[in-house]
């Protein structure tokens, strides 16, 4: 059960890193071109949303089983 809640936290972290990449045009310490930062940021945000959605779905399923 704890893993599902941690998955939500990790998803939020991916979204924050994606937003950071888009707004600051850098990934960790590597400067990026504008289009590259938008694409990488979109992928990171999309993956974060996917992780959060999957975790919420698993939490709902486990609550129905109980």
Image: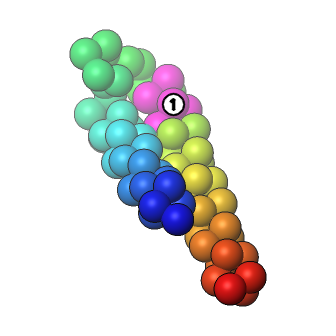
Foreground: 37 or 34? Answer: 37
Q: Is residue 11 visible?
A: yes
Residue 36, percent across and down? 50, 23
What's drawn in magenta, residue-wise?
A: 36-41
Image coordinates for residue 42, horizontal then vertical, percent: 54, 42
Q: Is residue 24 above or below residue 9?
A: above
Pick the front one: 27 or 56: 56
Look at the image and say whether residue 38 sits in the magenta stretch: yes
Query: Residue at the spot x=74%, y=82% of the render?
Result: 65
Give the quarter of the figure containing the C terminus: bottom right
> Callout 1: 10 Å neighbours few (<14), some, many (20+)?
many
Judging depth in this view, the residue of 55 and 21 nearest the camera is 55
Residue at image position (55%, 32%) is 39
- Asked whether residue 15 is in view, the answer is no
Q: Residue at x 59, y 62 (%)?
A: 55
Left/right of residue 20 with respect to residue 37 in the rendered view: left
Q: Is residue 24 left or right of residue 5?
A: left
Rendered view: 48 above or below 62: above
x then y, percent, for residue 49: 56, 56
Give the residue at x 58% y 45%. 47
Q: Is residue 66 left or right of residue 22?
A: right
Q: How is the image coloured?
A: rainbow
Q: Which residue is mark 1?
A: 40
21 magenta-colored: no
Q: Secondary structure at mark 1?
A: helix
**Nearer the observer, 54 or 16:** 54
């Amino acid at each position: 059960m704890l893993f599902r809640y941690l998955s939500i936290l990790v998803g939020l972290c991916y979204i924050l890193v994606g937003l950071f990449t888009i707004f600051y045009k850098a990934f960790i310490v590597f400067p990026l071109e504008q289009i590259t930062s938008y694409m990488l940021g979109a992928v990171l945000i999309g993956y974060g949303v996917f992780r959060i959605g999957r975790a919420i779905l698993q939490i709902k399923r486990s609550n129905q089983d109980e």
